[in-house]
Every structure is written in structure tokens, then in C-alpha cells.
Amino acid sequence: MGLLDQIGKTLSQVTDRAKFEAEKFQKTTRLQLEINELRRQVDLKLMELGQRAYDLQRAGHIHAPSLAELSLAIDQLRATLVAREEELKQAQSEVFVEPTPTTPPPATSPTAQSVPISEAPSPTPAAGSKICGQCGFVMPSHAIFCPNCGTRVG
């Protein structure tokens, strides 16, 4: 029965360890939540303090150069914010208008020659680039795959 006693003791130790770790996790999680809530409250109070200082400075009750600079910066940011919000409203209200064809496409003249794609002159790559053999896309020389069509070029 010594083996069963040893297994029972080991299981008891594992259970105690798991219980300890679970309680530790629960305690640390609770403390982290409390700390985060306290930090949030501090941030809210700092924001409230800042708003009150801003209001008092704007009303002329506080005459501190540093507050005047911050107030001016806030005013400029708010003006920029209002302008961006107006741009956003305009962008959101834009509607796509399909162009109406005014003239029919020009007919090809009988003298015009069509050149097959395989015979078309290929573009000359710039230094440090190469051309995809599949789609003709100009890409960096270190590319292994074409970013346009995905063909392996390396």
C-alpha cells in the first residue's frame, strides 16, 4: 500500500498547489482591476482639474504664462478638430456619380495596326528593379514574387 499512499500524497500536493495558484491568480487579478480603476479615477480627476484650470484661465482668473500657452494650444487643436470634423462630414456625404458618355468611342481606322502583347515593346526597368514576365509590372530587384500578379520571379 505504500505506492497508493505515495500517489495519494502527490495528488494532495498537486491539489494544494493548484488551489494556491488559483487563489493567487484571483487575488492578483482583483488587485490589478482595483489599480486600473484607481488609475482611471486619477486620470478623470486630472482631466477635470485641467478643464477647470482652462476655464479659469480663459475667464481671466488665472494669469500663468504656462497655462496661457497650454490654453492657446488647446484652442488651436480644437479649431483644427472642428475643421477636420467638417471635412469628415463632407467626405461622408459625397456620392459617386457615374459619368455619362458624351461621345461614342472612336472607331479604329483600317490603317491602324494592332500589335500583339507579346510583340509590344517591353518597358525598361529602372536601376534596382526588374519586370514581371507574366504581367509586366516593374518591381524591386529583390522581389521574389510579383506584387501585382503573384508570379514567382526570383
Image (spheres, grey):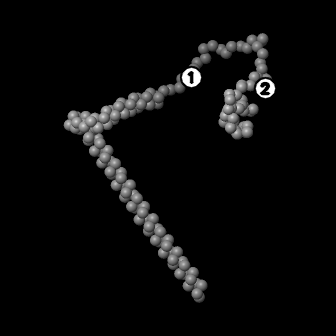
Residue 8: mark: none
Question: Can you say which quadrant of the picture contains the C terminus?
Answer: top right
Picture coordinates of residue 65, whole percent (x, y): 27, 36
Q: Residue at x 63, y 13 (%)?
A: 103
Report the residue at 58% width, 87% height from top: 2
How far apart marks 2 and 1 lie (CA) works out to 34 Å
Q: Earlier in the sequence, mark 2 or mark 1?
A: 1
Q: Callout 1, which amino acid? A: Glu
Q: Which residue is mark 1?
A: 98
136 above or below 21?
above
The disc label shown at residue 118, or none: 2
Label 2 neighbourhood size at 10 Å, few (<14), some (14-19), many (20+)? few
Secondary structure found at label 1: loop
Q: Position of residue 52 (x, y in %)?
A: 26, 41
Q: Residues within 10 Å of mark 1 (few under 14, many from 20)?
A: few
Which quadrant of the figure has residue 140? top right
Is residue 84 left or right of 120 when viewed as pictured? left
Q: Residue at x 71, y 25 (%)?
A: 123
Q: Residue at x 36, y 51 (%)?
A: 40
* Circles 2 and 1 in contact, beta carbons < 8 Å: no
Horizontal side of 61 relative to 23 (left or right) equals: left
Residue 113: image location, x then y, percent: 78, 16
